[in-house]
Image (spheres, helix red, strand yellow):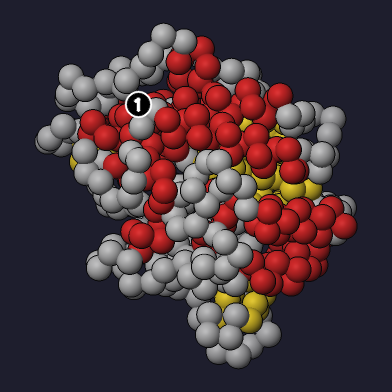
Amino acid sequence: MGEPFLFGVATSAYQIEGSTHVDGRGPSIWDVFTARPGAIADGATGELACDHYRRYREDVALMRWLGVRAYRFSVAWPRVLPEGRGRVNPKSLAFYERLVDALLEAGIAPFLTLYHWDLPWALEVQGGWRSRETAYAFAEYARVVARALADRVPFFATLNEPWCSAFLGHLTGEHAPGLRSLEAALKAAHHLLLGHGLAVEALRAEGVKRVGIVLNFTPVEGVEEARERADRYHNCFFLDPILGLGYPESPFRSALTPPIRPGDLDLIARPLDFLGVNYYTVARVAPGEGVYPVRYLPPEGEATALGWAVRPDGLYGLLKRLGALVPWPLYVTENGAAYEDRWAGEGAVEDPLRVAYLEAHLEAAFRARAEGVDLRGYFVWSLLDNFEWAHGYRPRFGLFYVDYPTQRRIPKRSALWYRDLLSAKGSN
């Protein structure tokens, strides 16, 4: 643990960039999904979002003002390869090169995620993640981005939260592409992992310094059988294959299984340099009915605007668990809270609940680190209020309030708190 601890902030392309029809970007599954009536809570899309594609220099200046050492962002696959594979769009690659150069000039390490859910629509019409071919297309995309940026970007994560892509996108239908099929979800899950393994090989061949993946984890509490089943679903389904353990016992009452071919599990278990850990809350469960017989109980105690229990002890326990299982350094790549913040023209938006949330979770993370967990970084979700997927724009996660009609960024009390914390720790 000799290297400096990385304090950072995180975003993703579709949630902040906007400019969905600019400079040759192709449509993504989220462009199509948000056009579906009723798919998004407030009927919003990512067409403008935070206008980051045009305002990125302003946003890098905000990060520099905060004093963060790293910025986790994602590259938009449909910008770089509008048809998903084949023809490269040089204008979009040039945008990410400008962003990376601006970060480096500000003394901020780029922490790049290749896939944060915005699959090119051209690949979705060919089967999307349900098709094995998409895994090979993803590796091709990884090579293109690495050839452009590996000399300047020290961290590459292949996937962000493949659990959400597979299960929310293909089983519950809450996320793009909005399917509701266990067979589709299991195919998508396996091909996401296969794409990860193929991309790891491609990135290493292009000289990327550190390669990893970002998984979301939800510690589970409740009656034993339901708890164990939910734990396999939320926490083991993607982690176990990456650790070389194969898939866990199925959490589903079904004979359907992932479409594994010889050699797949070895590819998926390629050694990594880090694991990104996204944590927000815990789940309380009880036995239920149906193909996934688990019922979710309401949170106890304090909760965020999305109804997520505020449980910093869950992060501590998760990091201790992962520290004992995972042979690579850990980074908390997302942690934050949504509240319905209000701005009335003041210089800083008051968000005391977010300050308390972040303070308690950072304390939990550093407690685990002090007890031997190889934790090397912590990224607040998020730098800016943004498009929060199926919830639209109402939930606000940002350290900076975004007044969407004017695109003005206003610091919240949490931004001032984080800046003071980093200054005190000598991170400027």
Out of 330 and 405, give the one closest to the viewer. Answer: 405
Out of 59 and 35, give the one closest to the viewer. Answer: 35
Out of 172 and 129, give the one closest to the viewer. Answer: 129
Q: Position of residue 200 (x, y in %)?
A: 61, 26
Number of on-image labels: 1
Q: Which residue is mark 1?
A: 232
Residue furthest to the front in view is 87
Q: Residue at x 51, y 66 (%)?
A: 20
Q: Residue at x 62, y 47 (%)?
A: 88
Q: Is residue 418 visible?
A: yes
**410 displayed left or right of 340:** right
The quadrant the C terminus occupies is: bottom right
Where 297 falls versus 133 (above or below)? below
Residue 32 found in image quarter? bottom left
Residue furthest to the bottom in view is 345
Q: Residue at x 61, y 36 (%)?
A: 142
Residue furthest to the left in view is 289
Out of 250 and 229, give the one closest to the viewer. Answer: 250
